[in-house]
Amino acid sequence: MSSFNEVAEIVGLLFDGLGVLVIVLGTVVAAARLVVCQRGATDRYRQFRQDIGRGILLGLEFLVAADIIRTVAVTPTLEGVLVLGLIVLIRTFLSTALQVELEGRWPWQRASEGSTRPGES
C-alpha cells in the first residue's frame, strides 16, 4: 500500500507542477500576443487580460486535481478532506470570478445568439 501512496504523491506533485507550468506559459503567451498584436490599445489590453485569465483558469484546474489526488489517495483523513473542501471552494470561487470577467456573464447563463464575448467583433 505504501507504493500506491508514493505513486499518488508523485502524480499529485506532477499535477501541481503542470498547473504552475500552465499558468506561467499562459502568461508568457499572453505577453507575446500583447507585443505582436496590432489592434488598438484598449483591445490589446483586454485581450491580454483574457489570455492571462484563460491560463490561470486552466492552471487552477490542474492544481485542484493535484489537491484531490493527494488528499483522497494519500492522506484520507477527515481534517485533510475538510482542508481539501476549503481549497476547492476558494479555487472554485476564483475560477467563477475569472470566467465572469472573461465572458461577461455567469457560467450558467447561455450566451444570446447575437451577442459576442468582450473583445470580439
Image: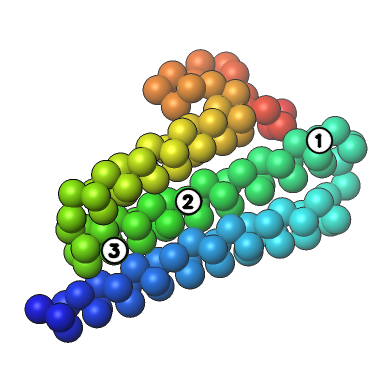
The three-letter amino acid code for the residue at tag 3 is: Arg
The colour scheme of the drawn protein is rainbow
Which residue lies under the disc numbered 3? 70
* Quarter of the view holding residue 21: bottom right
Which residue lies under the disc numbered 2? 60
Q: Position of residue 41 (x, y in %)?
A: 89, 37
Circle 2 Cα neighbour tier, 10 Å, few/some/many (<14 / 14–19 / ≥20):
many
* Pick the front one: 69 or 52: 69
* Quarter of the view holding residue 1: bottom left
Spatial separation of the CA atoms under disc 2 and disc 1: 26 Å
Residue placed at 49% from the left, 61% from the top?
19
Spatial separation of the CA atoms under disc 3 and disc 2: 15 Å
Spatial separation of the CA atoms under disc 1 and disc 3: 41 Å
Answer whether residue 48 is visible to the viewer in this image.
Answer: yes
Circle 3 Cα neighbour tier, 10 Å, few/some/many (<14 / 14–19 / ≥20):
many
Q: Position of residue 35 (x, y in %)?
A: 85, 56
> Counting residues from the N terminus, which is met first, the one under dot 1 or under dot 3?
1
Which residue lies under the disc numbered 1? 43
Mark 2 or 1, closer to the camera? 2
Position of the C terminus, as image quadrant, is top right
Left or right, residue 4 beside residue 34: left
* Pick the front one: 61 or 66: 66
Residue placed at 84% from the left, 56% from the top?
36
> Counting residues from the N terminus, which is met first, the one under dot 3 or under dot 2?
2
Q: Position of residue 62 (x, y in %)?
A: 42, 57
Q: Position of residue 13 (x, y in %)?
A: 39, 71
